[in-house]
Image: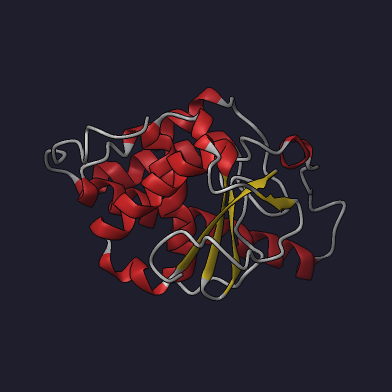
């Protein structure tokens, strides 16, 4: 279903399994999605699904975003960042497959992915890694702007990465510390007072 969580015909995504519509965690994430769609009308063209996934979220195809029910364990502002981050990949035209695990919170495999050095790889691969990193940072920046517009404190996104430690650059994602710094630079450029918190009531 466009612009809302899909209840049927779950997209097949590696590392994900369907979860009952009665699942409390799924309902929490669906409430986040519904609030996001109301606040960001352009997202009505996107199909959202909630499954039990190892990764936080990913752009499964050109118009389907799959989010993990496990995100319900996070504070609401951090969940909102992840929803916005995955939508940003879609809105910025990033190809399917480059998103997923934006914070590598839930995937230990993503956390332990080796850092690639210039001595270990050829130049074409280095170029692909750099492009992937640029896309992640661009999606982070766009997500922070969407959070600010909704009245969700974007500093919470940077704090999420702070809480995960320094991290390392992987083949697909910049380190946690690099992402936190980039987010704070984006916040500083936006300037001005933050809007009131968006929808204080609701699932946390």
Quadrant containing the C terminus in the rendered view: top left
Q: Quadrant of the rendered structure where residue 4 is?
A: bottom left
List x then y, in percent, for residue 108: 74, 34
Q: Is residue 122 left or right of residue 134?
A: right
Would residue 140 be visible to someone looking at this image?
Answer: no
Residue at left offset 25%, top offset 58%? 38
Q: Is residue 128 left or right of residue 147?
A: right
**Foreground residue among 96 and 128:** 96
Number of marks:
0
Q: Is residue 116 left or right of residue 120?
A: left
Query: Going by the picture, which residue comes out furthest to the front?
Result: 22
- Specify how the rendered protein is coloured: secondary structure
Query: Going by the picture, which residue comes out furthest to the right?
Result: 120
Residue at left offset 65%, top offset 36%? 106
Would residue 3 be visible to someone looking at this image?
Answer: yes
**Foreground residue among 44 and 146:** 44
List x then y, in percent, for residue 151: 20, 43
**Foreground residue among 177 and 100:** 100
List x then y, in percent, for residue 166: 60, 28
List x then y, in percent, for residue 190: 22, 49
Residue at left offset 50%, top offset 42%? 179
Q: Is residue 198 left or right of residue 36?
A: left
Please tell me whether residue 17 is drawn above or below residue 44 in the rendered image. Answer: above
Residue at left offset 59%, top offset 37%? 70
Please tell me whether residue 97 is drawn above or below residue 200 in the rendered image. Answer: below
């Amino acid at each position: 279903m466009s612009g809302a969580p899909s209840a049927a015909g779950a997209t097949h995504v590696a590392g994900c399994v369907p979860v009952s519509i009665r699942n409390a965690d799924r309902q929490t994430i669906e409430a986040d999605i519904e609030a996001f769609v109301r606040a960001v009308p352009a997202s009505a063209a996107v199909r959202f699904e909630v499954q039990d996934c190892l990764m936080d979220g990913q752009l499964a195809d050109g118009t389907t975003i799959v989010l993990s029910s496990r995100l319900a364990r996070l504070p609401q502002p951090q969940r909102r960042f992840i929803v916005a981050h995955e939508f940003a990949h879609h809105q910025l035209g990033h190809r399917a497959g480059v998103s997923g695990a934006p914070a590598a919170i839930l995937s230990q495999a993503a956390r332990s992915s080796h850092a690639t050095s210039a001595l270990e790889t050829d130049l074409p691969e280095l170029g692909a890694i750099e492009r992937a990193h640029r896309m992640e940072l661009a999606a982070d920046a766009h997500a922070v702007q969407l959070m600010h517009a909704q009245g969700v404190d974007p500093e919470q996104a940077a704090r999420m990465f702070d809480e995960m430690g320094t991290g390392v650059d992987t083949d697909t994602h910049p380190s946690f510390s690099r992402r936190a710094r980039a987010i704070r630079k984006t916040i500083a450029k936006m300037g001005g007072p933050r809007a009131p918190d968006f929808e204080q009531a609701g699932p946390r």
